[in-house]
Amino acid sequence: MIDLAVVDLSRLQFALTALYHFLFVPLTLGLSFMLVIMESIYVMTRRPIWRTITRFWGVLFGINFVLGVATGITMEFQFGMNWSYYSHYVGDIFGAPLAIEGLMAFFLEATFVGLMFFGWDKLKPHAHLFVTFMVALGTNLSALWILIANGWMQNPVGAAFNPDTMRMEVTDFMAVLFNPVAQAKFVHTVSAGYVCASVFVLGVSAFYLLRGKHVGFAKRSMTVASAFGLAASLSVVVLGDQSGYALTDNQKMKLAALEAMWHTEPAPAGLTLIGIPSMKDRETHYGVHVPWVMGLIATRTIDKPVEGIFELVATAEDRIESGVIAFDALEKIKADPADMAARAVFETHRRDLGYALLLKRHVADPRQASPELIKQTAWDTVPNVPALFWSFRIMAGVGMFMIALFGTAFVLCTLRKHHTKWFLRVAVLAIPLPWIAIEFGWILAEFGRQPWAVDGVLPTFLGASSLTVPQLWATIIGFTLLYGSLAVVEVRLILHTIKKGPFHEQETFGEPSPEAPLERPAAPAVA
Amino acid sequence: MDLPLDFATLRLIWWGLLGVLLIAFALTDGFDLGVGALLPFVARTDEERRMVINTVGATWEGNQVWFILGGGAIFAAWPFVYAVSFSGFYLAMFLVLSALILRPVSFKYRSKRPSPKWRSFWDWCLFIGGFVPALVFGVAVGNVLLGAPFHLDGDLRSFYDGSLLGLFTPFSLIAGLLSVAMLVLHGAAWLSVKAEKGPVLDRARLFGTVAGVLALVLFAAGGLYVAYGGLGYRITGALDINGFSNPLRTTVEAAPGAWLDNYGRYPWMLIAPALGFLGALAGLIGMWRRSAPLAFGGSSLSTVGIISTAGLSMFPFILPSSIDPQSSLTVWNASSSHLTLFIMLIVTVIFLPLILIYTTWVYRVLWGRTSTAALKTNPDLY
């Protein structure tokens, strides 16, 4: 039997390292493009203030970037370390986007990022702008491939189980690539990163304006942030994740869970704005309902119903029964690879094999499961409803607030009222909000995927490595200590840099020549 | 679907590409690791240390991607290897990751504050970030040559029956120290190309010389151990090189001395160990004669030779099992599907040349020795 303590600790470790990694990624995603915008203005106007602006935000970008890189190393390897069976089971599909991410995106980003910091006196302005753009492009392409990988876990298209290799294998790579769930996730996630970076720039600029320091610098930065942030916050909400929620049973279940919708509602379904969902009673107490809205969001129509949890559980029960037949056939194929009758049966029920594997949580051989156990296991397909319900509301609430924040910022900047005190205070206080929304967004997406590691294919508890509890504690404690100390150092360095301000460098090293580079002794003539 | 390359050919190509990625990692990030390991010893003053750090400061990040890509490529092309090795060498991997997590941060944060205590702390982190991965990678390769204690069950789930301390055997320690010596030689050679002439360079030459001699001795010792230490496995029975990736369908037995079989069968493979020796020798001569191209060229060739030797000796094995040879992973039974290998090959053929082109461009822009004088005028340096 599977050691559930190992599974739980592995999940804890993955959650900790992934959520921690994603503290740094959104700022990198957004700030890299904001640097491109700022530097473009510098290249077009050649006014030194824009060089200063680009370089200052660049320093903060760099402090943040290294932790994104450092924590990303863990992500690349911990599938193999902690999720060994998962890696074997789906590596044929899941590994490809990760490898392509390295080839196409991370190499680009990491190779050019050094030149971005070290190339100011070695490259002409437009060449340096090109380098900065390559960093932004690499960073964002990186997100694309990671989300193609993640999107496949939510909606495993273009693959089928191969009984000869006991794993999923790719059948249609284009389907994996153009997975609608992955595309929706990509737009949603990078937009969230742009919002995050905009809030950061807006908030820090507001801090300077409140103190009456570096006013020219701060006003310009604020203007860039408000325009970029408004566009991004609109796109993150409008191009939300919902478009993919009608696709698979698990995605439907996720939608039903985050809405705490226990029963199918006739079209167009209403939205429960707020309430107290209870897993035990399987209903939502004190719900406040808004008619029609849910149907519109989920199906983009007024005539399609949105399925509820009870109905989806009933579907799951059927699929478990069918899956047991597939499992039985698979055991026969394992014993005799030439058993053609078993292969034919397997083909018919292959789609539901994963549902039979859910039974392994309760019984070693799914074929021994009683009808009661199957009924009970069908309820395992329901994720933690209150957790999803509240995560979604926090995320969406912050999203709405962001639109208001950047709408106001944009109007104020357009009217040149950069000094509106109350707004500046709100802008400083708003700095942590996008991170909160983003982390809850991931909790929603991945907690909502449970009990599956890969929807309908592989239950999470089967994916873990055959490790021991002490090994897991060793790495969890190790990572927590390491990550915790680095977080403290990073935040201190960022605050220190903000305190020194954007002109500290000129005070130490003298004014840079506006038309860099004048002399390039060691560099060969390039660009 | 009909693919233009058959399964066995693709497996062979991807086995070669795995070698290419590991070698590229050792050639590029290898000197970053070596420089990190040398840092506290070749540079004494703060200025000297900053100079040494800045010889790799702008490029280590891109170099490190070879490691990340190596992980991704093993996942995509050799999922069994990815699943078995990283979960098996669990705590060793954790050590490597921790050291590699410290490294980016140390580069970036070290010179952000003037306090000598702060800087010395990060300098030692850079040392750890260079020395520990170099050692553990070597130890890991040593254990792969010995065979790892794992077995696969009928669902192809991997179970590992070993411990962190169990990884440190006499042979794997030879391999680990060889890896350190090889990368320190390479790091010293990089400094001879990139550091300004002066005391740092002289110390680097001294350490590089010691490392080069050690590399020669340890490589020879490793070779003798492989020949007489009872290492090796052999596939027995029928072999379908185009068959499904299912390790349990191959029969394997332990065969002491078998790691030398390939050199008898394919004598051209002897080029690899020869390069390992001659390259290190050339590197040493380059150090003595103050010839940067010879030192760096020699250490590079030596690295190519030593890593190729490990890979070629084991062919077609990638990760043999010491407790259940039947579970051993080979080129013919541990790959991804035919289609995935083909798609990944196309992607690689497109992007690998692009990577080489822009990496070369970046190195060209940053060409030239790093000097301590530049630290006073250039605000961008670490």
Image: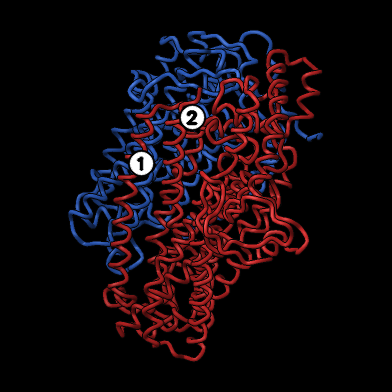
The crowding category of the residue bearing disc 2, from other C-alpha atoms within 10 Å (few below 14, some 14 to 19, many at least 20), is many
Which of the numbered marks, if any, corresponds to residue B147?
Answer: none
Q: Which of B49 and A399 is in front in this view?
A: A399
Q: How is the image coloured?
A: by chain
The image quadrant of residue A94 is: top right
- Kindly identify the amino acid type of the residue bearing the numbered disc 1: Ser
Q: Residue at x 58, y 43 (%)?
A: A382
Q: Is residue A495 visible?
A: yes
Kind of element beneath mark 2: loop
* Mark identifier at residue B98: 1
Residue sitting nearer the eye, A53 or A196 = A196
Q: Which chain is blue?
A: B
Judge from the rendering whether residue A40 lies leftward or rightward of residue B32; answer left or right: right
Q: In this view, does B84 lie above or below A489?
A: above
Residue found 48% across the figure and 39% down from its top: A77
Chain in red on the image: A
Residue B352 visible in the snapshot: no
Q: As displayed, is residue A328 above or below residue B42? A: above
- Relative image position of residue B181 (x, y in whole percent): 34, 32
Task: Kindly state the secondary structure of the residue where label 1 is placed.
Answer: helix
A6 in relation to B98, above or below = above
Seen from the viewer's position, the closer of residues A434 and B259 is A434
Which residue does the numbered mark 2 point to in the structure image?
A465
Compared to residue B336, the image places residue A132 above or below, namely below
Q: How far apart are marks 1 and 2 (CA)?
A: 20 Å
Q: Residues within 10 Å of mark 1 (few under 14, many from 20)?
A: many
